[in-house]
Image (spheres, helix red, strand yellow):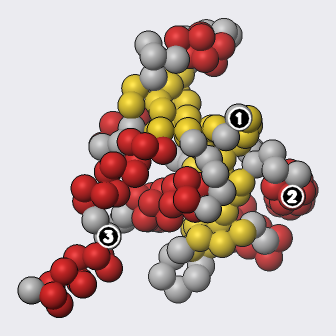
Amino acid sequence: MLKKRDLQDCQTLYHLMTHPDVFPFVRQKASSYEEYLFITKQTMEAEERGEIISRTILDEWGTPIGTISLFDIEDNAGFLGTWLGKPYHGKGYNKMAKDAFFDELFYELGIETIFMRIRKNNIRSQKAAEKLPYVISANETRKSLYEQLNAAGNNYNLFEIPKDQYTLHVMRSGTPDQESSQLLEA
């Protein structure tokens, strides 16, 4: 489902990223394939320095369909950025990618808080964030960060995913493996 970024995936990802329904909401924009290669190489180097964590999202057949990243990592917290190619919208890949990425961030890499800044005009992402039971609106609770994000204009809503809230959700909902073993014991 997820793999570390690889230059070999750039051709497919660049084509998906340039779709008009996707491009406006991509954080690391590129106006050419060569620029996308350069940005991806910079991303890989930044990950080696601990500044970012970035993964390619794959479909069931191992085809690259988008990316998911944690940017601006500081004090075991960072900002989530994710995008999927238009043909993959509404098919459940976003949730699966987030679940896998959050598990890696919280339980393998020591991240404590994930922030999401979502443009107020990005209705698709707003609704997706509001559906997640472990997401907290942080416009009021993280007022100084919210104001910093909106210093140039009131463009973003701020959401927070604390590790403990995510862990509680995972414990309550269980995993498919836990459900299978419980059924076998019954």
Proximity of marks 2 and 3: CB atoms separated by less than 8 Å: no
Q: Which residue is mark 3?
A: 175
**Disc 1 target residue:** 75
- Farthest residue toward the left? 186
Q: Residue at point 47% right, 30% down?
A: 159
CA distance separating discs 2 and 3: 31 Å
- Asked where in the image residue 8 lies, by quadrant, the reply is bottom right
Q: Position of residue 112 (x, y in %)?
A: 57, 42
Using a 10 Å C-alpha cutoff, classify the residue at mark 3 as few (fewer than 14 neighbours), some (14 to 19) or many (20 or more): few
Q: Earlier in the sequence, mark 1 or mark 3?
A: 1
Q: CA distance from mark 1 to mark 3?
A: 29 Å
Image position of 115 with respect to 42: above or below: above
At which x and y percent is residue 40?
82, 58
User: Which amino acid is tagged 2?
Assistant: Glu
Q: Secondary structure at mark 1?
A: loop
* Mark pair 1, 2: CA separation: 17 Å
List the single residue furthest toward the front. 185
Q: Earlier in the sequence, mark 1 or mark 2?
A: 2
Residue 161 location, x and y as percent? 47, 39
